Amino acid sequence: MKNKKDKGMMGIGTLIIFIATILVAAVAAAVLVATSSSLQQRSLMTGSQAEEGIATGVEAISVMATDGSSGADLEHFEVLARLQAGSDALNLNNTVLIMDTQSNSLSLSYAGGADAAGDDGPAVDTQHYNITYVKMGPDYKANYISRGDIVKMKFNCASCSSTATTGGIAENKKVRLKIVPRIGTSTQIEFTTPDVITDSRVSLWP
């Protein structure tokens, strides 16, 4: 038969085991809470980045071109554009414009110094594009395309031809334009120049 001393020892041992169990459970719970919080933050960040990547982009409205010194060849191009629905403001310094033809390809970066009013004429640099704000929205910010803005992206394609006698894009040529932001979806426009170019200013798309 156990005496009181033995029963007291067993009670203390049980209490120690009980306290140790509670401490282990508390530590495990703290680890689980910290881990779940970190995973939640990461998932929210990933979801936000994914949403931004899908939603951000430019909507092209029209594409126009004018001929240059080479007669009927189209050299000076204008893309009228705005943000697509639900898009965040687009930083033009991180946006590239690419033009592909059957014989050549141009990759144009933003020249900066956007003209906020009026028309500053066609771009003359075949490595850059510039813009004019046709309309400034309520969230206007220089060198960005923001909500409500309508911009005219202008560039020179005087070196698009692979021949030495012509500089721009001739009649009946397929052209692909891409507006590629660093974050977001790219916008692609495809068209064919007219079979006969008689006007100095030509509507190419839509």
Image (cartoon, helix red, strand yellow):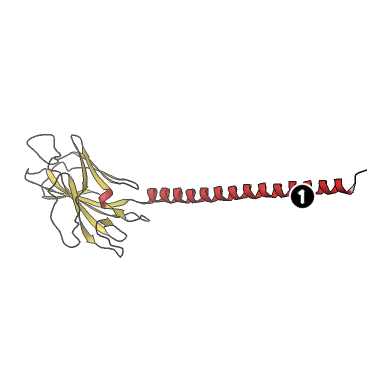
* Outermost residue to the bottom: 138
What secondary structure is found at the residue carrying circle 1? helix
* Outermost residue to the front: 5
Residue 51: give x, y in percent of width and height: 42, 50
Quadrant position of the N terminus in the picture: top right
Say above or below: 166 vs 58: above
Q: Nearer the viewer, residue 113 or 169?
A: 113
Residue 180: give x, y in percent of width and height: 29, 45
Q: Is residue 173 left or right of residue 39?
A: left
Q: Is residue 13 left or right of residue 114?
A: right
**Tag 1 residue:** 15
Label total for image = 1
Residue 114: give x, y in percent of width and height: 20, 57
Q: Is residue 144 left or right of residue 53?
A: left
Residue depicted at x 72% and y 50%: 19
> Type of residue at label 1?
Leu
Residue depicted at x 19% and y 49%: 129
Q: Quadrant of residue 195?
A: top left
Residue 87: give x, y in percent of width and height: 36, 54
Q: Nearer the viewer, residue 113 or 104?
A: 113
**Disc 1: CA contacts within 10 A as few (<14), some (14-19) or many (>=20):** few
Q: Is residue 179 left or right of residue 85?
A: left
